[in-house]
Image (tube, coloured by chain):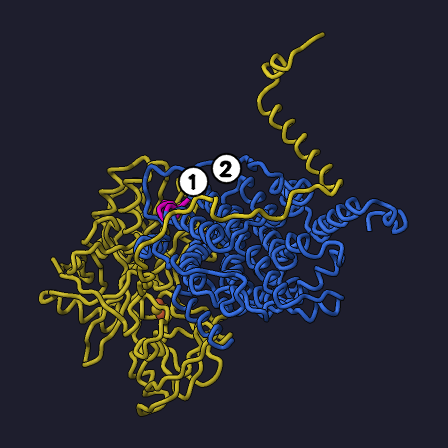
């Protein structure tokens, strides 16, 4: 049967044709190679090739823009718009950035507040408790009573707050954007970063479901109760809350009724067992609260075989409780301020600088113009982690370094002070 | 040997050479131990090493099968990437602003593109090959044109891979950033192409191993494999190669050009580390992670052992020495040693940072002599200026 080439082309599918053509070409190529007639290794280029024309005046090569100012820790000023007690012991501070630039925070991150107290600038981390997409505005919640000296002082001076000096935002406690199901376990002021995530993401992520288990001392002491209830009413199809109160649970009406008791292992197990809406399967789980609650929750999640990679925790359970001031650390260790030689190994280069035992490694390094990495500047994010290769230093506690990392000789440059000549490697 | 040596020696010369080349290509596959890695690299290896699709003189088609990932929520999902995006916008430069008026003579020993110390000419002499000083300069010209040609081909791969990655990456901030990388890579193609055209005067064919790696990551449908291949491995290779050349060249235009390109590349690797660290630690099963770990190891080996400049060998020495002899010679060339050193100081810490350097794989790196790089600084901790000052110091010490 005589099929002309054109006919043949028209009834063979195009991909097959192309495949055939490629194969023929492969065979021809290999055959040529075996005859010693393979392609030449290079081709001449030059005058004949199109060239983009001469440049009349040589222009200097651009200088790279420095990524981060290297002189010292740079703070940002916030203008306080209002500060009022939102529970008998918690202060909500609404603010806007003074430079008019967006805050640039991710929901769940925290700011480090630099607060002068008894002649020393103290630094404390406070989670944002506001929608992260509010542009230049935001809100911090500071829990006074159980918190440390800084929180107490902030709450006491609520009426006269006009400005705050902050660094950040920092932290990795943010929504796992690839998960479609999110389970939040919060207790006490641990709700703040979680509230920020919920307020930000529930309205926007229409495909996702969010459930929150929130334990608090009493309905009256519950931070952000109003906002969370409103959110749940507005988006009932994707957001629900289970409440638990140590006391006065009967003062609070909800469907289902609130649980009674402290949010520990037993209560959590019961809630997970009786509330099918909290589905851990394939969910991202977020934990924030006082450390006993965090431990208990971890254990429950382990028991439920939730893979560790799906659990996110905020290690600064109650940021207000950082109580060890710099003076304590230094005085306890050496008694008086001395000069020491600090060697910093950055990218294989060693730089020696003179530091004082009253300075953190970060302050000394930045002061000498070294581009040391950092973010929160107060032990909460580990961006400034360095490895001590020789010498002695004291690190303030608490901080977010794992025990294992400490054993391996890592310290956080932003809250560690040398007590002898010291060599650290930026890793 | 594929054939017994008596039969082999009876074959015509060109056939012998071709069989030698195939034998070398096959040894690549026989060195891969993990079957999944073999499956992932195999088809690309066939197209690159055996069929030499990069050398057939026609455009190569690489069908892609990834999904474009849309995000109608425009989520702010990776603040660090947003920072990178801002930085990328601020640091754009114009390829036309380089000092192109500088005239380059690749054969001028006063201003060498590659110094003579790059090649161990003594190592050629002991193999019975004596080059006159003028021939040495011509040989260096070939070698530098070969290197720059591979850079150019690699940049073309980077341009298309960056575009694919921009489509398929699952972070919205990453997509914006990706757009700047596409621009960067376009500019790199522009400047290397122009340098080759105007200053070097010759363009070498793409190296078969480079073709294989590019083909493999262009055709893989998994976005994170593209990322790993492009942003970590190929960019790592590029940083190694650019860094080496930057340190040793005396040619001012090239030095300028490389300085700018390196600063872009540092950002690209940083981006890869950010995206993959998150993804590998949260979204992969342990077995998937292991597959990537093995893949990265094999590709690292491929990059270490396989950029042998066979194209230069074919031009200069085919018939004068065997492929194996050439391989031994090139491996020991001081410039190549330096290149491996610079490349792995960048690459290994990045693998560690994204979680592909678990205790399980460490012994393998150790076995091939790479454990000395375990402790270095990863790209996300390294600014472009750190990187440059490191190179400048090394260059001053030369
Ligand atoms: S800068 Fe965040 S822990 Fe030191
Ligand atoms: Fe590039
Ligand atoms: Fe690149």
For residue A417, above or below residue B192: below
Q: Position of residue A318 (x, y in %)?
A: 31, 64
The residue segment tinted magenta is B170-179
Q: Is residue B178 above or below residue A171?
A: above
Residue for point 18% across, 54% down: A137
Rendered position, A424 above or below B147: below
Could you say where residue B393 lies in the image, as x and y percent from the top left?
A: 45, 74
Q: Which chain is blue?
A: B
Chain A visual colour: yellow
Is residue A31 in sight in this rendering? yes
**Residue in view at x 44 percent, y 82 percent:** A423
Question: What residue would you read off at disc 2?
Answer: B66
From the viewer's perspective, is A143 left or right of A369?
left
Q: Which mark is residue B167?
A: 1
Q: For this view, does B51 lie left or right of residue A311?
A: right
Labelled pair 1, 2 in contact (Cβ < 8 Å) = yes
User: Which sits in the foreground, B333 or A354?
Assistant: B333
Q: Secondary structure at mark 2?
A: loop
Q: Marks 1 and 2, how far apart in space?
A: 9 Å
């Amino acid at each position: 049967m005589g099929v002309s080439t054109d006919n043949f082309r028209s009834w063979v599918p195009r991909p097959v044709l192309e495949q055939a053509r490629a194969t023929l070409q492969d065979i021809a190529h290999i055959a040529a190679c075996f005859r010693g007639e393979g392609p030449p290794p290079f081709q001449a280029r030059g005058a004949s090739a199109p060239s983009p024309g001469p440049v009349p005046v040589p222009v200097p090569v651009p200088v790279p823009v420095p990524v981060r100012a290297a002189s010292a820790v740079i703070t940002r000023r916030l203008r306080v718009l209002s500060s009022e007690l939102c529970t008998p012991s918690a202060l909500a501070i609404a603010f806007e950035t003074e430079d008019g630039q967006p805050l640039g925070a991710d929901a769940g991150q925290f700011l480090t507040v630099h607060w002068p107290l008894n002649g020393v600038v103290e630094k404390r981390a406070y989670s944002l408790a506001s929608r992260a997409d509010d542009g230049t505005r935001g809100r911090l919640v500071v829990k006074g009573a159980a918190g440390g000296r800084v929180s107490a002082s902030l709450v006491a001076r609520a009426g006269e707050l006009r400005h705050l000096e902050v660094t950040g935002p920092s932290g990795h406690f943010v929504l796992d954007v690839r998960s479609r199901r999110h389970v939040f376990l919060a207790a006490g002021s641990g709700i703040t970063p979680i509230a920020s995530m919920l307020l930000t993401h529930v309205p926007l992520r229409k495909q996702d479901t969010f459930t929150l288990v929130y334990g608090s001392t009493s309905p009256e002491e519950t931070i952000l109760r109003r906002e969370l209830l409103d959110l749940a009413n507005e988006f009932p199809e994707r957001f629900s809350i289970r409440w638990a109160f140590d006391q006065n649970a009967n003062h609070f009406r909800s469907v289902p009724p609130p649980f009674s008791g402290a949010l520990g292992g037993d209560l959590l197990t019961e809630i997970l067992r009786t509330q099918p809406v909290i589905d851990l399967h394939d969910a991202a789980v977020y934990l924030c609260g006082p450390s006993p609650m965090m431990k208990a929750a971890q254990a429950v999640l382990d028991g439920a075989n939730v893979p560790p990679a799906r659990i996110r925790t905020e290690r600064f359970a109650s940021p207000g409780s950082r109580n060890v001031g710099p003076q304590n650390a230094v005085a306890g260790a050496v008694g008086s301020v001395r000069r020491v030689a600090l060697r910093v190994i950055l990218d294989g280069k060693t730089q020696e600088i003179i530091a004082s035992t009253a300075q953190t490694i970060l302050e000394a390094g930045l002061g000498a113009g070294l581009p040391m990495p950092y973010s929160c500047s107060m032990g909460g994010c580990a961006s400034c982690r360095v490895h001590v290769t020789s010498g002695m230093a004291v690190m303030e506690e608490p901080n977010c370094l794992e025990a294992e990392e400490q054993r391996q000789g890592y310290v956080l440059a932003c809250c560690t002070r040398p007590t002898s000549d010291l060599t650290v490697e930026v890793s | 040997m594929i054939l017994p040596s008596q039969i082999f020696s009876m074959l015509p010369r060109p056939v012998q050479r071709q069989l030698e080349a195939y034998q070398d290509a096959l040894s690549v596959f026989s060195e891969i131990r993990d079957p999944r890695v073999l499956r992932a690299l195999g088809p690309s290896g066939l197209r690159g090493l055996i069929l030499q699709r990069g050398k057939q003189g026609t455009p190569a088609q690489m069908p892609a099968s990834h999904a474009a990932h849309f995000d109608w929520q425009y989520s702010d999902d990776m603040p660090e990437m947003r920072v990178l995006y801002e930085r990328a916008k601020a640091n754009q430069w114009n390829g036309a602003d380089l000092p192109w008026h500088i005239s380059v003579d690749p054969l001028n020993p006063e201003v060498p593109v590659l110094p003579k110390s790059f090649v161990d000419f003594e190592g050629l002499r002991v193999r019975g090959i004596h080059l006159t000083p003028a021939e040495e300069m011509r040989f260096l010209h070939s070698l530098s044109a070969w290197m720059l040609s591979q850079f150019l081909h690699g940049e073309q791969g980077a341009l298309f891979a960056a575009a694919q990655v921009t489509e398929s990456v699952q972070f919205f901030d990453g997509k914006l950033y990706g757009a700047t990388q596409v621009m960067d890579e376009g500019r790199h193609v522009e400047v290397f192409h122009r340098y080759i055209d105007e200053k070097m005067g010759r363009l070498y064919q793409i190296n078969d191993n480079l073709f294989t790696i590019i083909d493999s990551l262009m055709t893989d449908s998994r976005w994170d494999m593209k990322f790993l291949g492009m942003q970590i491995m190929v960019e790592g290779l590029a940083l190694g190669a650019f860094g080496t050349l930057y340190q040793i060249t005396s040619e001012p235009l090239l030095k300028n050009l490389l300085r700018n390109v390196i600063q872009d590349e540092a950002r690209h690797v940083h981006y890869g580390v950010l995206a993959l660290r998150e993804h590998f630690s949260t979204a992969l099963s342990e077995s998937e992670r292991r597959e990537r770990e093995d893949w990265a190891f094999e590709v690292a080996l491929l990059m270490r052992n396989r950029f042998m400049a066979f194209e230069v060998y074919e031009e200069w020495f085919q018939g004068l020495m065997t492929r194996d002899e050439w391989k031994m010679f090139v491996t020991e060339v001081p410039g190549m040693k330096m290149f491996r050193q610079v490349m792995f100081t960048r690459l290994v810490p990045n693998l560690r940072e994204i979680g592909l350097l678990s205790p399980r794989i460490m012994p393998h790196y150790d076995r091939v002599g790479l454990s000395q790089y375990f402790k270095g600084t990863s790209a996300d901790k390294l600014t472009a200026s750190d990187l440059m000052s490191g190179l400048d110091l090394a260059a001053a010490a030369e």
